[in-house]
Structures are given as C-alpha cells and as structure tokens.
C-alpha cells in the first residue's frame, strides 16, 4: 500500500516543484502524492508546475480539474490553501507523510503542528532547529532511521547533502583533523532581488548584482550525521548571481601522510561505484556550473581540482544542483520512511524458502549445520 504524502508550503516553491517532478519520474515510487498546500490556488500551482524557468516545460500533462484539484498525467492532486498547518486537512485526507517545504516550520513546535493536524510523519526540507529532531543524509546515515525513532525528521540542507558524502569518505580513508569549507552558492529566495530591508545586511543587497558573503551552518551540520567530526569543520557561503547549481570548496588537514591527488580521487571513484552510487559522482571533464543542472547525485567531485599540499592538506571541489539533486534525496528519504512503515512488506529475494526462513529461522528446514 502506498503512503499518502502531502507537500506543505504556503506557495509551491522551487524545491517542492522539483520534488513533484522527481517523484513523478520514479515509476516504482511507494508514495502517492495526494495534496499540495499552495496559497496561490490551482491556477498558480498548475502553471508553475508546468512551466519552470530553470527546468523548462514539464513533459507531463498538467491540468486544472476543478477549483480544488489539479491533475498530473491524469493523477489528481488536491490543492489546499492555508498558512497555518493546524488548519490543513491532513486527518481528513489520511496523510501519512508531510514534506514540510516552507522553511518556516523547522522546529518541533512548528513542524509538530502537522502532526496535530493529523499527519503521522514530517520531513523538513531544511536544517532543523532543536536537538530533538534527528537529521538524515542519504548515503551517510540513513541506515540509522527506524519508524519508531521520531515523527519529525530533517533532510538537512542542500549543501550538507553535497558535503557529507565525500567528507565521510575523506574521514574513513584518511582521517580528518580539521577543515574549512566555502560554498559558492546560487542566490535563493531569502535574498532581495533589489536592495531592501533584511535582517542580514548583506542579503539586503541586490542578489542578481552582487557576490554576497553570508553564513552557512552546512559544515557544522555535518557532525549531525557524522558525530565524530563535531567541532572539526566550519565554513561560509558566497551567494552569486546565478539561479542554480552551486559548488563546494573544502580544505582539510588529514591524519594520513604522503597522499597524492590520485589517492584522494581514487577513494572517491571507489565509493561512487560502490556504496555511494547514485549519491556521489566523479567528473574528469573540465565543465562549468550549468553542465551540472539537473544532476541527480548529491555531489560531483571535480577531479582536476583536487589538490594535496605538503603532506597533510587536501583540497576538494564538488558541484551540486542545489535544487534538483537535493530534491532527489528528499524523495529517497521519503521512500525510506515509507519502507519502514509497520506492515510494509520487505523486498523479497524471490526464493520462497529464503523468505520463509527470514521469519522462521528456527524451523528445521532453515537450520544450518556445520
């Protein structure tokens, strides 16, 4: 049985439209997206899903069915409009999982309003506030998730999703002592297109005209999924006048001595072909940001920019589509949450005896004698 999912936003923002497109592309998805929360109503919801300035025209057939419903390739999706999660009809619609994409309800009391409204689980598509909300990054620590562990979880930020997978490899293979990161990041909706008031005076300046230095918690947040790195990483962001695709520049001191760039890239290639396949990639071609638009992976190592200085300093540069790649991981995490639901059948091997023995290991047929 599919888990009923709701997309909760005061308007359908870019990351939510990306989520819908990514989900639509997963033909075997265990999710059934049944409702979106968009204060713009069905007209805005359908138009902005169909026509996207970055993604282009959605190849799916998007139509308005009535004043409360749109369809995507004939699949009806209800459109509701409320800025207050407590007023959303999650109980009435039988919602299992809410994808919280407003960027506003990111703490326990805020995201918890979805639970009070009748949802069973909430995935926050942003860094969570509060130690009571666990964070999961696919490819790093998603194996720690269980259905019982929490009703509200966070998928971290796009930058943490880029950084954490290859930091994990660096630490496992070479041992990270300390490091600093700079993300050259496309401007976001939290900046001003023209000079206007903002609590961050740099973000108050015109986003399309400036390189804007600002803070980011992405590096520190790595310790939420890799606890052994607590206090070892920090960083800043430079917001730049590009609409999409960002790049992380990480410099770390490592414990292992005598490394070469080939050693570092080799570790990344091994991971990209093995446990991090679909999450991490390595690129040997001299490309630029637009070439990574709609990249499905969380991070792509630019192998030609990997450097080793002295005997213990490593520099790594990784590209990421901060909208599309991140949305793919949100879909992955939602799939994981759905797969852990009580009563959800596990994917079997196809061997009836093997499947029988998984639940009946003490049966005479299942015993293994040495």
Image (spheres, rainbow, N blue to C red):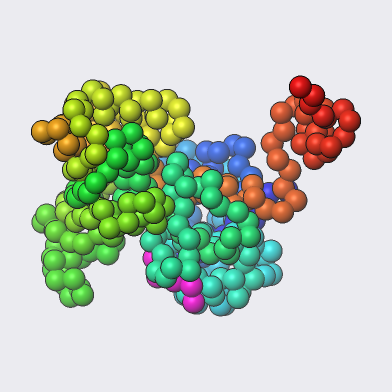
Q: Is residue 222 visible?
A: no
Where 190 sits versus 298, above or below? below
Q: Could you tell whether 366 is left or right of 199 in the image?
A: right
Q: What's the residue at 39%, 54% (across, down)?
A: 227
Q: In x, y percent, where is residue 128?
A: 41, 65
Q: Is residue 22 visible?
A: yes
| Residue found at the very far front of the displayed protein | 370
- Image quadrant holding the C terminus, namely top right
Where 200 sits versus 98, above or below? below
68 drawn magenta: no
Where 311 sits versus 236, above or below? above
110 or 54, nearer to the observer: 110
SS majority, magenta: loop
105 drawn magenta: yes
Q: In x, y percent, where is residue 94?
A: 69, 64
Q: What's the residue at 36%, 51% (across, down)?
A: 228
Numbered marks: total? 0
Magenta range: 103-109
For residue 47, what is the image quadrant?
Answer: bottom left
Q: Could you tell whether 180 is left or right of 83 in the image?
A: left
Where 334 sits versus 66, above or below? above
107 or 261, nearer to the observer: 261
265 or 239, nearer to the observer: 265
Q: What's the residue at 57%, 47% (across, down)?
A: 336
263 or 8, nearer to the observer: 263
């Amino acid at each position: 049985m599919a888990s009923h999912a709701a997309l909760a936003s005061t308007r359908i923002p870019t990351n939510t439209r990306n989520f819908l497109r990514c989900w639509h592309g997963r033909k075997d998805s265990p999710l059934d997206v049944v409702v979106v929360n968009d204060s713009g109503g069905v007209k805005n919801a359908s138009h902005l899903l169909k026509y996207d300035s970055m993604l282009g025209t959605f190849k799916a057939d998007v139509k308005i069915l009535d004043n409360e419903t749109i369809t995507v390739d004939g699949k009806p999706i209800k459109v509701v409009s409320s800025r207050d999660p407590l007023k959303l009809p999650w109980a009435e619609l039988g919602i299992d999982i809410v994808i919280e994409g407003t960027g506003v309800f990111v703490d326990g009391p805020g995201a918890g309003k979805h639970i009070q409204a009748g949802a069973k689980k909430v995935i926050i598509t942003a860094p969570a506030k509060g130690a009571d909300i666990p964070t999961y990054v696919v490819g790093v620590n998603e194996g720690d998730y269980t259905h019982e562990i929490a009703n509200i979880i966070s998928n971290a930020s796009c930058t943490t999703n880029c950084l954490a997978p290859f930091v994990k490899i660096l630490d496992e293979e070479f041992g990270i002592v300390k490091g600093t990161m700079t993300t050259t990041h496309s401007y976001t909706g939290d900046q001003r297109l023209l000079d206007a008031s903002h609590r961050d005076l740099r973000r108050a300046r015109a986003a399309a005209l400036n390189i804007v230095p600002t803070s980011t918690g992405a590096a520190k947040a790595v310790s939420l999924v890799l606890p052994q790195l607590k206090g070892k990483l920090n960083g800043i962001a430079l917001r730049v006048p590009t609409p999409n695709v960002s790049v992380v520049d990480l410099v770390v001191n490592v414990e292992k001595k005598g490394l070469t760039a080939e050693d570092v890239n080799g570790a990344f290639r091994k991971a990209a072909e093995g446990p991090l396949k679909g999450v991490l990639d390595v690129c040997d071609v001299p490309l630029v940001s637009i070439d990574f638009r709609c990249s499905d992976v969380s991070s792509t190592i630019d192998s030609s920019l990997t450097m080793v200085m002295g005997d213990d300093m490593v520099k790594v540069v990784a590209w990421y589509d901060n909208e599309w790649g991140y949305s793919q991981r949100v879909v992955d995490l939602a799939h994981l949450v759905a797969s852990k639901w009580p009563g959800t059948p596990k994917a079997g091997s196809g061997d009836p005896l093997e499947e029988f023995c998984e639940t009946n290991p003490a049966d005479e047929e299942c015993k293994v004698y040495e």
